[in-house]
Structures are given as C-alpha cells and as structure tokens.
Amino acid sequence: MRLKLGLVELAPDTTGGAATYGRAMRHILSKVCEELDFDLVRLVHDKNRDHIAGIDESVISYRKWIPKSRQNPLERLWTRIQGPADSTAPDSLPKVLVREKVDLVWFLAPNRVIEQVRDTPFVMTVWDLAHREVQGFPEFNSGRGWAQRESWYTQNIGRAFHVATDSTHTGKSLERIYGLYPHNWTAVGLPFPPEIAIDDAKAKEIESPYFYYPASFWPHKNHKVLIDALALLEDTPACLVFTGTDEGMEDTLKIYAREKGLENRVKFLGRVTDAEVQGLISQSLGVLMPSILGPTNYPPLEALRLGVPSVVSTAHHFDEIPEGSLAVIEPGNAEQWANEMTRLSRSPSKVPALDGGVKSSKAKVRQILESFKKIREVMRLV
C-alpha cells in the first residue's frame, strides 16, 4: 500500500531564501517519494495560490481555520447570523488531510497552522530561533511577536514526528531550549533547487567594482557596519550594493550613507528577482553577510556555488562548508570588515565552487521518510 505525503507550500515562493529553500525541498521530496513509493500531494492556502509556482488542478487548497474560542463576540454573532459556512469554500487543513488520507504532512517552515493538525503526523522545519538568539530587535520581540514565535515551538516541537533543521547548531539549540530528543531531528541543510537562473543585466550597469549584500532592510541585518567599513576604504574605488525589501531601515541607511559622504558609493537597488541576485553575486568582488542572526543564510552559499568569495559574521554556523572557504568576523567590527574588503579588492579571486548540497540533503530526507515507512509497516501488523 502506497503512503501519501502532504507538502504544505510556502508563499510566496517567487523570491528570497525561503523561496529557494521551498523549490529545492519540493524537488527533493518529489524524487524521494518516487523512490520510496509515496504519493506526493501539494497543499496551499487558498489565498496564496497566485503566489505559488506550478499550480495546477493537482494542487489542493485549504482555508484558514479560526477556532471559535479565538473569535471575538462580534465574529461569533456574525457566524450565527450567516448560518452554515459557504459550502464552496475549501476545507481547513486538518479536514483536507483527513479527507485526502494523507499519512504524513511536511511543513517547510514553522507557522501557526501546525497547531491545528492533531490527527496527522508531521515533519516541522526550523531554520533558526531568532526570538531566542537575537534579543532586542523589534522584528522578533515587539508586540505579540515573541509570544507568537514561542508558541510555534512549545506547542509543536514535542508533537512532531521529526524536525528538519538548517544546521546542527539549530538542532542543538532545540535540544537545549525545548528538550527535543537528539534522535528526533536532522540537519537537512540548505540545498539548492535544480535550476538557478542568472541575469547579470543589473550587475553590468554598475561601473565600479562592488561588494554585494542581498538582504531586506531589517535592523538585525546590520547594513550599517558595512557603510562604516566602506568609509574606512579611502584608496579603493569599490562601492557597496544593497538589494532587498524595505522593512523600515532603508531610508535611515540612505541618510546615514549621505552623512558619511558615501552617497555615490552605496547603491540601493531595491527588490530584485532571484535571477538578478545571482547575476549581482557573480560579478561582485565578494558577498558580505554581517547579519546578527544566523546560523545559516543562502547568499554566502550562493556565492561559493559561483566561486565568489564571501565574508560572514560569527553568527553563522554552516555544517558542510569546506574549511577556509568563508572568512568569518565579528558582526559589529567595522575595521575587520574593512580589512576583508581591502583584501578582496586588492586581490580579486575565485574560490573553489561549492556543490548544491542536494545529494546530502536528499539522503537525509530519505532517512526521515524511510523511518516513517517502517512505523507504518509495524502498524499494519498489529
């Protein structure tokens, strides 16, 4: 009897590291399912269908489900006035899983929908523990943000059939903070999707050599230290290129660069496509990642995949990077960043290309699904 795996898609899956991870894992899971005789079912929130690639009739929609206890009095009154819900609306995720006879559901990221799933075993993915590791930043700690993030883990980690992490560092943190057993998590890593397009048109528009930092403008991304480092480089024509979505810091950083007299040497290109990111990486002197939050990020890996040097902060802990491939320095030390930028600008070079990590990630995903298959085989005997 074939087992059925439900994959809850991330949205949007068009740009950014989460999208890259989602496309890579969709490819890996589809291949492993073929090998192990699983049927793969893609599941998507009905409001996000337009933001997911490759949607067709085989992709099953589910709708948001709000327990009555969480509705305010007006919502409960409106529900009684309206009568039965629209019969044409998709079912909630728990109902879809039961209806479609899904044996195991794989979540590509922690989110609140996981707590709804009570009768179907699930794999939960954890990339980082930002709210625990990076205190004081509003994107993780303001309002109900901290409590909401904490609930994702406290309510679901212990129930998960298995937890897939980006790194050993994250898995060990889950053990220490939430009591996750060592045998119940696997560092799957950050694999690459099978096809990665490169569009270097924007890169060719930049007339001077440049260092590149692709990161949305969150406070924890620490763009400021690179501006400070650039201010120390008076004998090089190199500039900084920033791309990403404005999350509240972009205007502040533009003003800061102008006050430093670097308005013409710090270029803000806004949000660009994944293909343009790859093009900008490929033509850069190096990728810089001074983020306060790790333990992993895609841009340094994408740089190494293209043979481009990368410098990361000490917050990063990659599992399968060849020793010496990355320069690692303190996130807040502008002089150290300036020294690395000077070294790279004086001796532009390529580094040995990193493979996509797919083979290793696929083997680990296969082990997770094989272990679930063995449990189901035991259950059929009792």
Image (cartoon, rainbow, N blue to C red):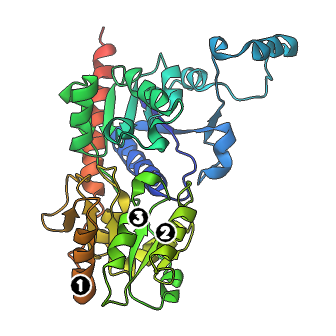
Q: Quadrant of the N terminus?
A: top left
The amino acid beneath tag 3 is: Lys
Q: Quadrant of the C terminus?
A: top left
SS of the residue at dot 3?
helix
The amino acid beneath tag 1 is: Ser
Numbered disc in front, either 2 or 1: 2
* x and y percentages locating residue 177 in the rendered image: 26, 27
* x and y percentages locating residue 77 in the rendered image: 81, 11
SS of the residue at dot 1?
loop
- Say whether residue 237 is left or right of residue 374: right
Tell me the residue that label 2 is attached to.
Answer: 256
Rendered view: 86 above or below 173: above
Tell me the residue that label 1 is attached to.
Answer: 349
Give the residue at x 82% y 10%: 80
| Other-residue count near label 2 (Cα within 10 Å), few / some / many at <14 / 14–19 / ≥20 | some
Which image quadrant for residue 49? top right
Q: Earlier in the sequence, mark 1 or mark 3?
A: 3
Numbered disc in front, either 3 or 2: 2
- Say whether residue 231 is left or right of residue 50: left
Q: Earlier in the sequence, mark 2 or mark 1?
A: 2
SS of the residue at dot 2?
helix
Rendered view: 325 above or below 314: below
* x and y percentages locating residue 174 in the rendered image: 27, 31
Tell me the residue that label 3 is attached to.
Answer: 224
Give whichever of 321, 225 is nearer the camera.
225
